[in-house]
Amino acid sequence: MAKYHVIVNGKQYVVEVGDVTTSPIQVVVNGEPKTVTIEEVTIASAPPPSPAPPAPPPAAPAPQTKEPVPEPPSAPAPAGAVEGEVVVAPMPGKVLSVRVQVGDRVSEGDTVCTLEAMKMEMPISSTTTGTVKAVHVQPGVNVSHDDPLVTIG
């Protein structure tokens, strides 16, 4: 975590900021853990565009070629669908973030996801070294004790 001194309305805070590549971001403000969600705001600096002129009448239809339809995002793999060591939820909670994807190399002890349980955030670590074979959860999903999170082979 990176540590900063932040002054807000004349009051100084010591803020430790976690991984900023994902949202929500884990921060510690004066020793108290917090979760911060960041959303990008776009500010319009130009006046709104004027209405477009009426469109010309449509031309004769062009020959159509079939474009491939993109596949919808795949659902989490069911446990047991792939071989490897399954990292399971140590307690019931809500998945806050998943830090790995299928194909990622992980070492024993690497954080693979973060759970929120009893109003605390808990990093869940890989129990082995290998390649992520399956991700069984998505952020926002509630899990029970011993539910599979990821499979590493």
Image: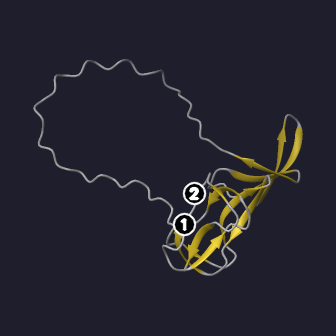
Coordinates of residue 53 in the picture (x, y in percent): 28, 18
Residue 111 falls left or right of residue 28: left
Q: Amino acid at mark 2?
A: Gln
Q: Is residue 73 above or below residue 135?
A: above
Q: Is residue 83 visible?
A: yes
Vertical placement of residue 43 versus 124, above or below: above
Instruction: Say which quadrant the N terminus sits in.
Output: bottom right
Q: Amino acid at mark 1?
A: Val
Q: Are marks 2 and 1 in contact (CB under 8 Å)?
A: yes
| Helix, strand or loop under label 1 | strand
Camera-side residue: 103 or 93? 93
Quadrant (top left, top right, bottom left, bottom right) of the C terminus: bottom right
Name the one closer to the observer, 32 or 136.
136
| Disc number for residue 14 | none
In this rendering, does residue 18 appear at all?
Answer: no
Residue 31 horizontal side relative to residue 85, left or right:
right
Instruction: Identify the colour scheme used.
Output: secondary structure
Residue at point 53%, 28% (across, down): 44
Give residue 3's position: percent from left, percent from top. Answer: 80, 56
Instruction: Quickly name the residue at label 1.
Output: 135
For label 1, count other residues whose C-alpha is less than 10 Å away and answer few (under 14), some (14-19) or many (20+). Answer: many
Q: Which mark, by number, is residue 138?
A: 2
Which image quarter: residue 71? bottom left
Label 2 packing within 10 angstroms: few (<14), some (14-19), many (20+): some
How many numbered discs, if any? Answer: 2
Name the residue: 74% across, 64% down. Answer: 91
Frontmost residue, 12 versus 31: 31
Q: CA distance from mark 2 to mark 1?
A: 8 Å
Q: Residue at x 44, y 55 (%)?
A: 73
Residue 105: x and y, percent? 56, 76
Q: Is residue 73 above or below residue 7?
A: below
Residue drawn where x is 54% and y is 66% of the image: 135
